Image (cartoon, rainbow, N blue to C red):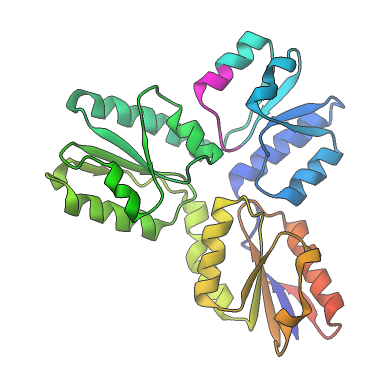
Amino acid sequence: MIVEIDDKSGFCFGVVRAITEAERALGSGSTVYSLGDIVHNRIEVQRLEQLGLRTVTHADMPRLAGCRLFIRAHGEPPTTYAAARELGIEVTDAPCPVVARLQRRVKEAHERMLPTGGQVVILGKRGHAEVVGLTGQVPDPTIVVERAEDLSLIDFARPVYFLSQTTQSIALFEELGAEMRRRAADPDQVYIDDTICRQVANREGHLAAFARRFDAVIFVSGRKSSNGKVLCEVCRAANARTYQVEEAAELRAEWFEGAESVGICGATSTPKWLMQDVADAIGNLNSEFKIQNS
C-alpha cells in the first residue's frame, strides 16, 4: 500500500516570506509580537511560539510600546500602522506582495467609483484578516459578499466594481460576476477585476486530479484557513473519501479500511513537515503502507 505526499501542497510564496521574516527577527533573541496568527495553522503557530513568537490582538497594542510588532501576510489597514507609530512600536512588515497589490487596487476602485456613486464589492470571508485589511484601506464602505444570497446587499441601479479576496474560488467569483451583470440596470457598469492569487487558484485543478488517484485522501489544514476550506472541498468533490485533519493525532484507523493508496495534501498555510508527520502516523497505523513523495 502507498501513502503519497503531494509535492505541490504546502506554503505559498506569501506565507514562506512571512515565516522567513519572523524566524529572522526571532533569531536576534528578542520577543516578536505577531498581530494575529502569523499563519492560519495552529500547529505551525505553536512551533514559532516555541521560538519566542507571541500572538497579540489590536487591543494589546497600547502595552507594546518599544516592542517589535510583526505584520503577517494577510496585511493590515492604514489605521494599524498609524497606531503603531503613535505608540512607539517598531513594525516588521511582511504582507504578501499579492495582498499588498490588492490593497492598492481596492483604493483605486473606490477612487474610480466615487464620481458616479458606485459601489466597491469584495468576494471574501467577513472578519477574515485579509478582508479586514482590504475594507480598511479607505473610510468609505465596502460591500463584502460570501455567496449568491449576499448580492441583495448591492444596489444594481448603480455602478459596481467587483474584486476578490486572494484565496477565493475562481468558479464562485465568475459565477457571482455573471449574476451581477445579469441583474444590473446597465451590465457595462459592472467592472470585474479578478484579483485571485493564481499560485493558490492553480492548485484547484491539480488537487482534483491528485485526489482522484487515491482510495482515500487526507487534507492537512488549520480550521481557520479560508484557503484550506476551499481546497479541501475541491478534494472532496473529486474523492468522497477525503478527510480533513489539523494534525496526526486526529487520524482514525477506519478511514483507511480497504484502502490500497492514500494521498496527503494541504493548504497554502500547511507546512511540509506537518504533512510528513501525518504520513508517518498513517504508516504507523498500518505498517504495510509505503510512504513516498509525489
Q: In the rendered image, which quarter is residue 207 located in?
A: bottom right
162, above or below 213, in the image: above
| Coordinates of residue 9 in the picture (x, y in percent) | 63, 61
185 left or right, relative to 231: left
Residue 100 can be seen, yes or no: no
54, above or below 233, in the image: above
| Residue in the picture at 66% in, 58% down | 221
204, above or below 93, in the image: below
| Residue in the picture at 78% in, 32% down | 54
| Residue in the picture at 24% in, 50% down | 180
| Coordinates of residue 39 in the picture (x, y in percent) | 66, 44
Position of the C terminus by quadrant:
bottom right
From the viewer's side, name the closer residue of 254 and 21.
254
| Residue in the picture at 22% in, 39% down | 155
Residue extent of the magenta highlight:
73-81
Position of the N terminus by quadrant:
bottom right
Residue 84 belongs to the span the image colors magenta: no
Residue 75 belongs to the span the image colors magenta: yes
